[in-house]
Image: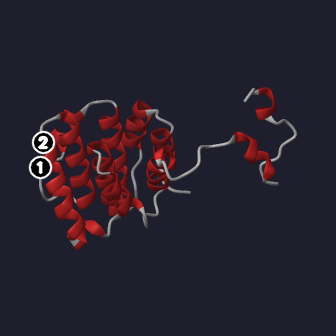
Amino acid sequence: MSDLYDLKTFFLLGQYQAAINEGGKVKPRDEIGRIERDIFVYRAFIEQGSFQVVLDELKDDRVPPPLLAVRLLASYLSGKTGQEAVVEQADTWTRDPDFAHDDMVLLMLAIIYERVGLTQKAMQCVFSNKLLEAYVLLEAPLRRSPLLPPFDPHLLPCCSLCISFHDPFKELAF
């Protein structure tokens, strides 16, 4: 099991303070693990609205690309960097091999693109991404798409894997 299992779980469940606390306790064995830990801890700070903590701790431009992407997200959400500048930086990074081949960087850029309303660019960033969050980010615009039919809960029990002894849809009046 990963050293970061609890940290990631807290973050994904929205328990951001617990994720920050866990990040302070966990000591990953390698550099990649330390970077991943820092990404989740800084993202937890961002989710809490503590953008300045992230900006103060990631001042140096020599930090790894994923942490630069987290800093860009914090800078945009804090209002310190305007939308045009953030999109320009994100576009530059999508063309740079050091950034464009990192799934976490692409996830951060997709979040930025989605926030500024550039859904197509966001989907391009997460289309081949291997991270769970990327799939969630990819699914959200698809659900809003006018090309897809609306969700029909009556179709769900047709799948043999979805049938259970208790059908919650029977109680709903459609």
| Most foreground residue, 16 or 164 | 164
| Most foreground residue, 153 or 45 | 153
Q: Relative to 51, does residue 68 appear above or below in the rendering?
A: below
Crowding at dot 1, Cα within 10 Å, few <14 / some 14-19 / many 20+, comes out as few
Q: Position of residue 141 (x, y in %)?
A: 44, 49
Residue ID at (76%, 34%): 169
Residue type indicated by callout 2: Thr
Residue ID at (50%, 53%): 147
Residue ID at (19%, 34%): 78
Q: Is residue 34 visible?
A: no
* Residue farthest along the bottom direction in this orientation: 97
Element marked by disc 1? helix
Crowding at dot 2, Cα within 10 Å, few <14 / some 14-19 / many 20+, comes out as some
Q: Quadrant of the N terminus?
A: bottom right
Residue ID at (30%, 37%): 46
- Image quadrant assignment for residue 109: bottom left
Q: Which mark is residue 85?
A: 1
Mark 2 sits on what residue? 81
Element marked by disc 2? loop
Q: Position of residue 18 (x, y in %)?
A: 44, 33
Spatial separation of the CA atoms under disc 2 and disc 1:
7 Å
Q: Position of residue 48 (x, y in %)?
A: 33, 30
Residue 84 falls left or right of residue 169: left
Q: Relative to 147, does residue 81 appear above or below in the rendering?
A: above
Q: Relative to 47, does residue 149 appear above or below in the rendering?
A: below
**2 and 1 marks in contact (CB < 8 Å):** yes
Residue type indicated by callout 1: Ala
Give the color scheme: rainbow, by chain, secondary structure or one colour: secondary structure
Q: Position of residue 81 (x, y in %)?
A: 12, 42
Q: Quadrant of the C terminus?
A: top right
Residue 155 falls left or right of residue 62: right
